[in-house]
Image (cartoon, rainbow, N blue to C red):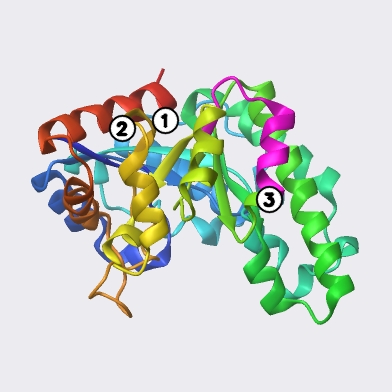
């Protein structure tokens, strides 16, 4: 059996000092592919560099304007002297703007974020690296985080509108480039679903770290989306999500860790690892009726159909 961690922030500093040993361990555990979504402009070149090193190739058509938003310092985690191609784990990447970037203290007001500027920057780097990326994202809407970081109801409403505008921009970009999209959600299904229905992406995408009811899950699946299944299903209290995952078609599921975030049950407080995608798989086999072999085979096929075709 082979595994793909379909959502892992391998470019984060938590992995900078032991990247090659970690990837070697991944290969030893039959994890042969990791998909790395960027979360904000400072990470775009980092994830591209990781993909380049993994494949031992040179990036083509790197955006001439990437220096506008990426200093050389941000490459340190991804472009050190370690030759990660030796690990033989395929790393592929996605480019996007995470909603948390829009909820930072200095960015709470829409006046502090120029949508047109970031649209130009993202369009430029995606256009110059279209063959080096597999999706747009991570992007989406996070109401929970916005509630915790906005001072009043008006500020909250303004920030959610800002998140919607940036999400809409990235949906349009995915549509223009015929790419799937990687969607972040938190207390926001009621905002996200209408926008997905409006854009009707040809390649749809994945609802990262899905948590919710069967009805919510089916609404996404009916639009052609797949659901990212991670550590949530290791928690017995996640009954709604577990019930949904049990009932959905196997063709709609992907495995993920969201490392270094979202630790599994029993690992709270620790840094999550892409190695845990095997444990997520084991938890999934306890939920589903199919054999472990069938689950593994179908989920790898799901990854290839969504990201690599």
Where is the N terminus found, in terms of image quarters? top left
Instruction: Please tell me whether mark 3 sits on a helix, a strand or a loop.
Output: helix
- Inspect the magenta stretch and tell me whether residue 155 lies in it: no
Give residue 250's mark: 2
Give residue 279's mark: none
Residue 161 in sight in this render: yes
- Callout 1: 10 Å neighbours few (<14), some, many (20+)? few
Please state the horizontal and vertical placement of residue 51, each as a whole percent of the image. Answer: 39, 38
Where is the C terminus found, in terms of image quarters? top left
Please state the horizontal and vertical placement of residue 198, each as a whole percent of the image. Answer: 74, 30
Nearer to us in this view, 288 or 149: 288
Please state the horizontal and vertical placement of residue 105, each as a whole percent of the image. Answer: 73, 76
**Span colored in magenta:** 190-205
Cα–Cα span, label 2 and label 3: 24 Å
- The residue identified by callout 1 is 58
Give residue 190's mark: 3
| Residue that appears at 43% across and 41% down | 227
Give the vertical position of 151 relative to 215 (above or below): below
User: From the viewer's perspective, is 137 left or right of 13?
Assistant: right
Instruction: Please tell me whether mark 1 sits on a helix, a strand or a loop.
Output: loop
What secondary structure prevails in the magenta region?
A: helix
Instruction: Please tell me whether mark 2 sits on a helix, a strand or a loop.
Output: helix
Cα–Cα span, label 2 and label 1: 36 Å
- Inspect the magenta stretch and tell me whether residue 200 lies in it: yes
Eye-nearest disc, 3 or 1:
3
């Amino acid at each position: 059996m082979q595994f793909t961690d379909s959502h892992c922030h391998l470019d984060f500093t938590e992995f900078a000092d032991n990247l090659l040993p970690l990837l070697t361990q991944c290969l030893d555990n039959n994890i042969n592919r990791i998909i790395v979504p960027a979360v904000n402009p400072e990470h775009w070149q980092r994830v591209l560099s990781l993909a380049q090193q993994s494949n031992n190739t040179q990036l083509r058509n790197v955006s001439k304007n990437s220096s506008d938003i990426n200093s050389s310092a941000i490459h340190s985690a991804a472009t050190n002297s370690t030759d990660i191609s030796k690990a033989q784990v395929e790393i592929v990447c996605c480019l996007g703007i995470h909603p948390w970037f829009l909820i930072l203290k200095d960015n709470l007001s829409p006046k502090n974020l120029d949508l047109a500027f970031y649209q130009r920057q993202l369009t430029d780097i995606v256009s110059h690296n279209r063959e080096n990326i597999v999706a747009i994202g991570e992007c989406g809407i996070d109401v929970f985080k916005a509630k915790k970081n906005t001072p009043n109801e008006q500020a909250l409403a303004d920030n959610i509108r800002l998140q919607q505008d940036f999400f809409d921009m990235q949906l349009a970009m995915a549509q223009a480039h015929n790419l799937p999209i990687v969607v972040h959600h938190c207390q926001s299904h009621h905002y996200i679903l209408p926008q997905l229905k409006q854009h009707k992406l040809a390649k749809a995408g994945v609802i990262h770290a899905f948590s919710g009811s069967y009805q919510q899950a089916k609404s996404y699946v009916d639009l052609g989306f797949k659901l990212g299944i991670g550590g949530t299903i290791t928690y017995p209290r996640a009954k709604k999500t577990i019930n949904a995952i049990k009932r959905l078609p196997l063709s709609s599921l992907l495995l993920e860790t969201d490392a270094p975030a979202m630790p599994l049950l029993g690992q709270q407080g620790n840094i999550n690892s892409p190695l845990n995608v095997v444990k997520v798989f084991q938890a999934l086999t306890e939920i589903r009726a199919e054999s472990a072999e069938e689950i593994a085979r179908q989920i790898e096929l799901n990854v290839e159909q969504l990201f690599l075709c």
